[in-house]
Image (cartoon, rainbow, N blue to C red):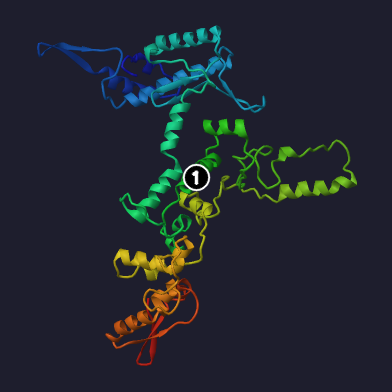
């Protein structure tokens, strides 16, 4: 972009009020370079140039921004003069915003009316810009695109199908319960519960849709903070800003009549007329209005700010927004007893599933439509449930008794309650008894 930039443009560039010393320094950096042409592998003498920068010159990005700022201001002047009309955003004439151009990296998007006069004026801008800067618009890389025509809909549809959140979550679920195998595996725990944090009985896996909303929520915070950004003005012009309120500091950033500072809306909604005496039936409205004015203290030493209540620092965090969007679906869970135990991960995962009551016992299989006899496969004395299979079955009790006897311990079985409830009480439902002392076994 800066390969053909005039060097003298820097010396005459007074738009940003750079000092003469600074401009002389920069001019010396780009004009003191000398070049040589190799003929048959040998240099033929050195010469200087009056335009362009060397490949990879560290000053090139700076000059690019300065020159494009000049083009931007030129387009603004042409738009203000009515020679071209930009793209109008917003339905109201009083709040409509006209955008004539957008600049991103080395791409320039210019918007004007599809009339011969406006295209002629735009061509004149390009010619003038080339004459001043030495940079020529490459028409071979330029393109006319009509606004309002669906050009990329098919491409976007293909991308949306591949990136659908439901498909991504399905891959997560299948991998969690079945690994990389192709065979079908039962999903024992509801995915909504799995997305809960570990403290609430989940695995802390983020919900794709919810996390995407939390990431996009960062734009809501930027909407409240970046008051002079162009994208914010576009949103305000098209949709308005009735859902944002402000915490008043010194009042320098808040528009008295237009910005919302309380739940009653902005001040412009009030129809104030003091040309006559206030009637009795208007006293209540007058009192309400004055209460609104005096209820907002103004500080001269602090600036206006936006507060994010869910965090202690009052600053927006994607993590906290995700937690607000997805509150826990279960009460607190004894996660330390499960995930902090010195056991293999596979064992901890089984215990977690058992505490939630989701392992493949007879009662759970019958809930899934597998009709088998509800009979304990070990003791054959009662129906098979999680609590019975792991605690109450006579065969299991003998097994626990054998294990504890190796350490000189005995056990006493807890009564009642589900396996998950017993786990929440501090153990898995067994009390160890040794030398008159009792302790929980987790």
Q: Is residue 171 or residue 217 the one in the foreground?
A: 171
In the rendered image, is residue 294 in sight? yes
Question: Is 207 left, or right, of 339 in this rendering?
Answer: right
Q: Is residue 412 or residue 312 the one in the foreground?
A: 412
- In the image, residue 341 sits, relative to residue 232, either above or below, namely below
Residue 89, quarter of the rendered image: top right
- How many marks overall? 1
Residue 364: x %, y % from top left: 45, 65
Q: Is residue 51 or residue 162 the one in the foreground?
A: 162
Q: Residue at x 36, y 26 (%)?
A: 62
Residue 186: x %, y % from top left: 40, 57
Q: Residue at x 62, y 27 (%)?
A: 90
Residue 368: x %, y % from top left: 46, 60
Q: Which corner quadrant holds the C terminus?
A: bottom left
- In the image, residue 311 sits, relative to residue 31, either above or below, namely below
- In the image, residue 322 sits, relative to residue 74, either above or below, namely below
- In the image, residue 3 sits, relative to residue 303, either above or below, namely above
SS assignment at label 1: helix
Residue 412: x %, y % from top left: 41, 86
Q: Which residue is mark 1?
A: 213
Question: Is 365 left, or right, of 257 in this rendering?
Answer: left
Q: Residue at x 42, y 39 (%)?
A: 163
In the rendered image, is residue 333 in sight? no
**Other-residue count near label 1 (Cα within 10 Å), few / some / many at <14 / 14–19 / ≥20:** some
Q: Is residue 371 or residue 274 the one in the foreground?
A: 371
Q: Which corner quadrant holds the N terminus?
A: top left
Question: Is 163 left, or right, of 228 in this rendering?
Answer: left
Residue 25, quarter of the rendered image: top left
Question: Is 173 left, or right, of 101 in this rendering?
Answer: left
């Amino acid at each position: 972009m800066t390969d053909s930039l005039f060097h003298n443009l820097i010396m005459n560039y007074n738009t940003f009020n750079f000092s003469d010393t600074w401009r002389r320094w920069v001019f010396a950096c780009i004009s003191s370079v000398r070049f040589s042409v190799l003929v048959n592998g040998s240099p033929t003498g050195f010469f200087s140039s009056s335009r362009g920068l060397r490949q990879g010159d560290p000053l090139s990005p700076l000059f690019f921004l300065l020159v494009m700022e000049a083009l931007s201001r030129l387009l603004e002047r042409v738009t203000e003069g009515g020679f071209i009309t930009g793209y109008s955003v917003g339905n109201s004439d009083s709040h409509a915003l006209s955008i004539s151009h957008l600049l991103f990296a080395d791409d320039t998007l210019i918007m004007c009316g599809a009339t011969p006069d406006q295209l002629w004026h735009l061509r004149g801008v390009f010619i003038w810009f080339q004459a001043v800067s030495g940079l020529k618009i490459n028409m071979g890389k330029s393109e006319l695109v009509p606004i309002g025509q669906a050009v990329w809909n098919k491409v976007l549809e293909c991308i949306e199908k591949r990136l659908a959140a439901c498909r991504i979550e399905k891959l997560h679920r299948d991998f969690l319960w079945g690994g990389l195998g192709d065979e079908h595996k039962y999903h024992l725990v509801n995915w909504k519960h799995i997305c809960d944090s570990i403290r609430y009985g989940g695995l802390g896996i983020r919900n794709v849709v919810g996390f995407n909303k939390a990431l996009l929520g960062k734009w809501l915070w930027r909407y409240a903070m970046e008051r002079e950004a162009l994208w914010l003005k576009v949103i305000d012009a098209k949709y308005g800003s009735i859902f944002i309120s402000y915490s008043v500091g010194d009042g320098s950033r808040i528009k008295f009549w237009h910005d919302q500072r309380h739940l009653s809306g902005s001040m412009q909604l009030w129809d104030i007329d003091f040309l006559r005496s206030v009637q009795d039936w208007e006293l209540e409205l007058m009192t309400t209005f004055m209460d609104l004015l005096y209820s907002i203290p103004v500080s001269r030493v602090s600036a206006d700010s936006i507060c994010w209540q869910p965090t202690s620092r009052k600053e927006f965090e994607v993590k906290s927004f995700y937690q607000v969007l997805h509150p826990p679906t279960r009460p607190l869970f004894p996660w330390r007893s499960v995930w902090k135990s010195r056991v293999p991960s596979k064992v901890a995962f089984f215990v977690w599933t058992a505490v939630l009551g989701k392992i493949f016992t007879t009662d759970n299989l019958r809930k899934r439509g597998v009709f088998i006899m509800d009979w304990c496969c070990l003791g054959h004395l009662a129906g098979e449930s999680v609590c019975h299979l792991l605690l109450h079955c006579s065969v299991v009790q003998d097994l626990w008794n054998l294990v504890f006897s190796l350490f000189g311990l005995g056990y006493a079985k807890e009564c009642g309650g589900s396996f998950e409830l017993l786990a929440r009480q501090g153990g898995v439902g067994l009390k160890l008894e040794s030398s008159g002392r009792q302790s929980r076994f987790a």
